[in-house]
Amino acid sequence: MRIKKWARIVGVVFQNSTDQFIKLEAQDEIALSQQNSLQPYYWTERRITAAINQLNLAEVLNHVSYQLSGGQQKKLQVLSMLIMSQPILLFDEPLAGLDAVSLKNVMQLIKKTVTDLKISSLLISHQRVGVTEFVDYELKLADKSLTIEGEVKEHNGQA
Amino acid sequence: MGKRKKHLNATILTIIMLGIGFQIAFSRSVILNVVVTFICLLYLLYCQVLLRKVLIMLLLAFPLAFGSWWSFIMFGTGDTWHSAWIYGSRVYAYLLLGSMLTLTVPVKEILISLSIHIKLSETFVYGLLASFNLLPRIRQQFKLIQYSAQMRGKSYRPWQPALYLRIIIVALHWSEDLAEAMSSQGFSEGFPRTRTFNDPLPRWQWGFAIIVIMLYFSAAFLVSPW
Amino acid sequence: MQNMSQKPKRGWSLRDVIFLAIIGIFFGVIYQVWSYAYYLIAATPLKPYANDLTLGVWIMAGPLAGVLLQKAGATIIGELLAAAVEMLLFSSWGAANLISGFIQGLGNELGFACTGYKNWSKLGLLFSTIGATILTFVWDWFQSGYSEYHFGLLLTLLIIRFISIGFFAGVLVYWIKKLVLKTGINK
């Protein structure tokens, strides 16, 4: 029961996409999040449609999630968890397999959502290019030590 | 394996376990169940299995033995007391018979011993061994699967096909990765490999297994005590 | 599903073995979660009810392996692998695990054999659940002393057993198979 409570506080975008999917088709995956979202007033039909378009997922909505490309799976994962809107969101390598355009769109959507909803989020990524401009703090793990790389931008609750 | 020279070989223990285990199902003797239980218990002590481990095992099985015993008192026909004691003590006979193998020999040695002495296919032996190493990861993955659903306001129950789909997908990916890794490390199916250790099985132990199984047979079905 | 195993219909590849063993270990983990419920009932005279009610869950591994790999022997070997996993990782029952695993797997396997290993769908699963129900009941007649119970209880147990096996090892396995087919992951 305790774990169930945690699941409403901390949301995770898993590194391995197939660990995320509950339903068969992409649209059901999104619908499930919409149905159980913790911020139902924010995630209106219109906003969800806009996000789907922004991530270029509209054409694959009726595809089976397991058969999407790696990048599409990542975007579906991110969108599903953003709609859930737990107060804390962890992203484990959410950008793997994304092209530059998708990457920018994903980061913009994450940034806008966590800012609007005051979600604390932590993003783990191997790549910095195109990412650092969206984050408040950057922690660098190198040579077995974790160091703060300084404030990237003004602080409003995310790292 | 040198330390356990005086112990019975894992293959012999397996044969005894199955040979007697199968017969126990048809024997109707309380006394024999008790005798089997005690002999196995003595063997466990001889092998210096941790006493605490044995006690916990005996204790945990008690409710099951008691449930069997009681159910015959309530629902039995004929000599209900005799039945109750047969099936109550049978729980312990089975438990001790099994633990004689599983508590005295590590899993790896059981499987390798079976592959050497009764030619159990090495694909199975090494496939099982490789999978067993995944146990902690599998436990972790099971929790992760549950969490993935709970994050979305759902819970998987054992009667929902979706839970098994998730398990099958993980098993497909991991088995592919592992089999590939093993092949690239030089495991070739169906070819003999060099053994890194030997597993001595003195000939007398084969005789011992046959005698023990025959002895049980005559005691259970020719003498058949109470 | 035909190609889920890369090897010809009869041979067993390392990947098949590992695949079934991993599923077996997952089942072991699920059993552990569930076994508390069984344990509570099994400590009372209602133990035979607990046995028969939960039996279907215990024997799912065999028919699941059968419908996924679709080859002769897959069912019984799948069940035996699950029993070996149970014996070596999760319990110390040893002989009891292996022998009942064999009986259960054989019952299911015979069902598929009745269709000449041609039907791995509804009909095969129906036969398989009937086979398993009969064979495990005969085994419990001796091993668990069912021969000593009075007739009313026996009849009830037989019905409960068939429902449990029919649902878990039949209907649920069928659903799972359909779901797996829909995902298109059978590479």
Image (tube, coloured by chain):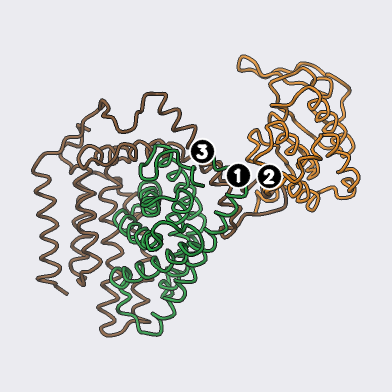
Chain colours: A orange, B brown, C green
Q: Disc 3, disc 2: CB below 8 Å?
A: no
Residue at the spot 75% in from the left edge and 18% down from the top edge: A128
Q: Is residue C104 above or below residue B110?
A: below
Q: On the image, which quarter does residue A108 sit in? A: top right
Which residue corresponds to mark 2? Answer: A64
Q: Nearer the viewer, residue C147 or B77?
A: C147
Locate residue C185 relative to residue C98 in the image: left or right: right
Residue A61 location (% of width, % of height): 77, 44
Query: Is residue C91 among what the camera can see?
Result: no
Callout 1: few (<14), some (14-19), or many (20+) C-alpha neighbours within 10 Å? few
Q: Amino acid at mark 1?
A: Gly
The circle drawn on residue C184 is 1
Q: Amino acid at mark 3?
A: Arg
Q: Amino acid at mark 2?
A: Val
Mark 3 and mark 2: Cα distance apart in space: 27 Å
Which residue corresponds to mark 3? Answer: B137
Residue at the spot 35% in from the left edge and 36% down from the top edge: B126
Query: Is residue A86 among what the camera can see?
Result: yes
**Quarter placement of the N terminus of chain A:** bottom right
Are the residues under badges 3 and 1 in a single subunit? no
Q: Nearer the viewer, residue C129 or C40?
A: C129
Label 1, secondary structure: give it.
loop
Q: Residue furthest top?
A: A143
